[in-house]
Image (cartoon, rainbow, N blue to C red):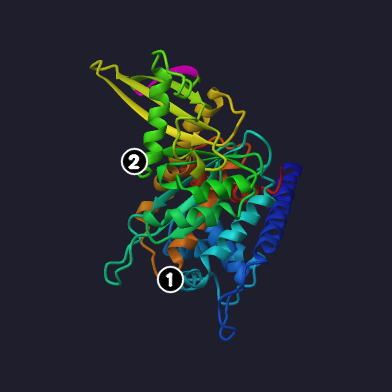
C-alpha cells in the first residue's frame, strides 16, 4: 500500500509540475479568439491538444476522442464545464493562432527544458520539409513547407518558420536564424541556403557556417572546384601565379546496409584562387567531400563529390567532416520520425494556420519524448505507452529539468 501511495504522490507532483510548466509557457501566447462565446480556457485547450498529440493523436478528430476517453481526469485539472474540446473547437482555434507567435512560444519551451545551446562544438542543421498532403487544390493553396533548425547534439527542434514553398527558404532561413542563439555553434545548410545574406546572419550572430555549394552559385562553385584542382596540380608554377593551395585531409569508412562507404575530406584555407571571395565576407575555408560507395551484393561502385564553404578559421578537417555527416540527422531523426511516428505526410488539416501550428505541436511532442532520460522504446511506441499509462504521460510532460 505504501508503494501505491508513493507512486500516486509522484503522479500528482508531476501533474502539478506539468500544469505549472504549460501555464507559464503559454502565458506569452495571445488568445486570438473574440471575447464573446468563449467556452474553453485558452491554455487548457492548447495543453490538452499537446497531451493528445504526445499520446498518439495525429489530428483533431483523434484529439476529440482522446479527450472524451479521459474526460473525468481532464475535468479534475481544467475548467471544462462544457466537457473536453471537440475537433471543431481545436480546428477553429489553431486556425487563428499566429504561427510565428506559436513558434516563439515553442522556443521558450525549449529554453525551459534547459537545452544548452551555447558553447563551441554545437551543431545546428537547418533544413526544410513539405507536409505533402496539406495542399488545397480548390483554393489553389500549395502544401505547407516548414524550415526547421535542428540541434543535433540534443535531438531537438530549436525553431521553425512556415513558407509557401521550398523556393521561399532563402527568405525564411535568415528570419529563423535571427531568433536563435548561435553563439559558438556551427550551422549547416544545403545548397539552397548558400547565400551571402545567410552567411552574414550566421556570423553576425556569433556562429560559424558550413554551407553546401552547387551550381545555383555557378561562379562560387567553379572557384571552389578550381581551388582543389590547383591543389592537386603538382606542376612547377611561374612567379606570377598564386602558390599551389595547401590541403588538410582525412579519411574514414564504414560498413552497413549492405554497402561500404569510404569518405575523403579535404579542407583548404588557401583562397587565392577564389575570384569571388570578396563577395563572401567571413568565409575562411573550402571543403571537398568525396564519397565512394560499394554495394556488397554486386560489387558496383559509385563516386560522388560535394563542395562546401565555411567560416570557422580553426576547425580541423575531421570536425568539418563530422558536421557534414551530422547534417543529415535532420532527415533521419526529425523528418523521417515525423513521417513515420506522427504520420505528418498524411496530415490533411489545412484551414487557416492549422497545418503550421500542428507542426509546432509535433515538434514539441517529439522534444518531450526525446528528453525522457529513461525512454527505452521508439517514438511511435512511446506515444502509445503515453496513451495507455497516465503516470508515464505525466512524467514526460513534467520534463522541466536539465
Q: Which residue is mark 1?
A: 352
- Identify which residue, 134 or 161, lies in the foreground: 161
The correct choice, above or below, for 152 with respect to 134 in the image is: above
Whole-percent x and y of residue 47?
A: 59, 62
**SS under mark 2:** loop
The correct choice, above or below, for 104 with respect to 280 in the image is: below
Numbered disc total: 2
Mark closer to the chain start, 1 or 2: 2
Indicate whether residue 249 is drawn in magenta.
yes
Q: Which picture quadrant has residue 108? A: bottom right
- Identify which residue, 391 or 324, lies in the foreground: 324
Determine the residue positioned at 36% across, 24% down.
Answer: 257
Magenta range is 248-257
The correct choice, above or below, for 120 with respect to 4 in the image is: above
- Identify which residue, 278 or 171, lies in the foreground: 278
Whole-percent x and y of residue 297?
A: 25, 17
Q: Is residue 103 left or right of residue 140?
A: right
Residue 67 image label: none
**SS under mark 1:** loop
Q: Nearer the viewer, mark 1 or mark 2?
A: 2
Q: Is residue 359 visible?
A: no
Q: Which residue is mark 2?
A: 215
Task: Give the prevailing secondary structure in the magenta stretch.
Answer: strand
* Spatial separation of the CA atoms under disc 1 and disc 2: 36 Å
Determine the residue positioned at 71% across, 60% down.
Answer: 20
Indicate whether residue 250 is drawn in magenta.
yes
Whole-percent x and y of residue 330?
A: 47, 41
Q: Is residue 285 left or right of residue 169?
A: right
Amino acid at each position: 500500500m505504501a508503494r501505491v501511495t508513493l507512486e500516486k504522490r509522484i503522479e500528482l507532483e508531476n501533474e502539478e509540475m506539468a500544469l505549472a510548466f504549460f501555464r507559464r509557457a503559454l502565458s506569452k501566447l495571445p488568445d486570438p479568439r473574440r471575447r464573446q462565446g468563449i467556452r474553453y480556457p485558452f491554455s487548457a485547450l492548447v495543453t490538452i491538444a499537446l497531451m493528445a498529440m504526445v499520446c498518439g493523436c495525429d489530428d483533431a478528430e483523434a484529439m476529440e476522442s482522446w479527450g472524451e476517453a479521459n474526460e473525468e481526469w481532464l475535468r479534475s485539472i481544467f475548467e471544462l464545464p462544457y466537457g473536453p474540446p471537440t475537433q471543431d473547437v481545436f480546428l477553429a482555434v489553431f486556425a487563428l493562432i499566429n504561427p510565428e507567435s506559436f513558434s516563439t512560444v515553442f522556443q521558450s519551451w525549449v529554453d525551459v527544458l534547459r537545452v544548452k545551446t551555447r558553447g563551441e562544438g554545437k551543431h545546428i542543421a537547418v533544413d526544410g520539409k513539405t507536409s505533402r498532403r496539406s495542399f488545397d487544390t480548390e483554393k489553389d493553396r500549395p502544401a505547407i513547407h516548414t524550415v526547421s533548425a535542428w540541434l543535433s547534439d540534443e535531438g531537438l527542434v530549436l525553431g521553425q518558420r512556415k513558407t509557401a514553398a521550398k523556393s521561399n527558404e532563402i527568405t525564411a532561413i535568415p528570419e529563423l536564424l535571427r531568433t536563435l542563439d548561435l553563439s559558438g555553434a556551427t550551422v549547416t545548410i544545403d545548397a539552397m541556403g548558400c547565400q551571402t545574406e545567410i552567411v552574414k546572419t550566421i556570423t553576425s550572430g556569433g556562429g560559424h557556417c558550413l554551407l553546401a555549394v552547387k551550381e545555383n552559385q555557378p561562379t562560387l562553385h567553379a572557384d571552389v572546384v578550381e581551388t582543389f584542382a590547383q591543389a592537386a596540380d603538382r606542376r612547377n608554377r611561374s612567379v606570377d601565379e598564386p602558390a599551389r593551395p595547401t590541403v588538410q585531409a582525412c579519411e574514414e569508412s564504414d560498413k552497413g546496409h549492405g554497402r561500404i562507404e569510404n569518405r575523403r575530406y579535404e579542407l583548404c584555407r588557401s583562397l587565392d584562387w577564389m575570384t569571388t571571395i570578396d563577395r563572401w565576407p567571413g568565409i575562411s575555408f573550402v571543403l571537398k567531400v568525396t564519397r565512394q560507395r560499394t554495394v556488397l551484393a554486386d560489387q558496383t561502385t559509385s563516386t560522388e563529390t560535394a563542395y562546401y564553404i565555411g567560416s570557422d578559421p580553426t576547425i580541423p578537417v575531421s570536425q568539418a567532416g563530422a558536421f557534414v555527416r551530422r547534417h543529415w540527422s535532420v532527415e533521419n531523426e526529425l523528418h523521417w520520425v515525423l513521417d513515420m511516428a506522427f504520420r505528418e505526410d498524411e496530415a490533411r488539416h489545412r484551414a487557416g494556420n492549422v497545418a503550421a501550428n500542428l507542426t509546432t505541436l509535433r515538434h514539441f511532442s517529439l522534444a518531450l519524448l526525446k528528453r525522457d532520460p529513461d525512454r527505452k522504446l521508439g517514438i511511435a511506441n512511446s506515444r502509445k505507452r503515453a496513451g495507455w499509462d497516465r503516470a508515464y504521460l505525466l512524467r514526460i510532460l513534467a520534463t522541466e529539468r536539465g
